[in-house]
Amino acid sequence: MWGLVFLAAVGAPAPYPLTGSACDLLSLDEKLCSCTDLVDHKFIVDCEIPIKLAALNFTDSIGMKVLGDPCTDPATISIDVVEKNFAIDMPVQRITCGSSLLVPIPGLVFNIPDVGQLSVDVDVEFDGTIDKLRIEAGVNACVKAGGETMCGEDIPWLQNLLPIWIIDGTWHFASVCNSLASP
């Protein structure tokens, strides 16, 4: 499935020429992630995220690929989540700039007695322009109990652990996109 998303994104026309490396701009944890520049200013960030929930005696890792296309109008990202133990391969829809997203990962939802339901989620915040593009993409966990939902830092036994951002920052992609001046 990732291949279909990749092929569709690479084939899309771009309004700006590439004049630099998008990967050089991103600050990533090189122990967890790698970044590859693609044609037409796109990039792929490929990460393996360790998940440890001691309260549930749960240890796993989640693979996440983010395909970024910062120079189209509007900028977009696509995400693919892979988890081997539960055979999960979950593509997330194309996300346009100005959007946020919190999507439970199927198979990673747990019932916790006397607490509620805990889900491991893809968490994305994406906003700005090519001059100041803010991207937060990673993994979070949310507990649903009694009609209320608490996520990450709001859950007492998960605060300071979540969310785990694989991309977290604001970047100036104008040097990469080098927008064309109108005649």
Image (cartoon, rainbow, N blue to C red):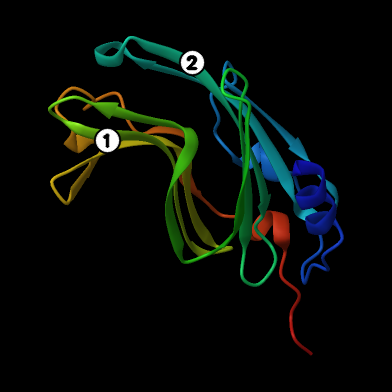
Q: Is residue 50 above or below residue 44?
A: above
What is the distance, in whole Å, between disc 1 and disc 2 at their CAs? 18 Å
* Residue 101 on image: x %, y %: 44, 54
* CA neighbours of label 1 inside 10 A, class few (<14), some (14 to 19), many (20+): some
* Residue 163 on image: x %, y %: 35, 34
- Camera-near label (1 vs 2) is 1
Q: What mark, if any, has residue 117 been given in the picture?
A: 1
- Residue at left offset 66%, top offset 50%: 68
Of callouts 1 and 2, which one flags the residue occurring earlier in the amino acid sequence? Answer: 2
Q: What mark, if any, has residue 60 been given in the picture?
A: 2
- Residue at left offset 56%, top offset 23%: 86
Circle 1 SS class: strand
* Residue 84 on image: x %, y %: 62, 20
- Residue at left offset 54%, top offset 34%: 27
- Residue at left offset 56%, top offset 54%: 172
Give amino acid for label 2.
Asp
Circle 2 SS class: strand
Quadrant for the N terminus, please: top right
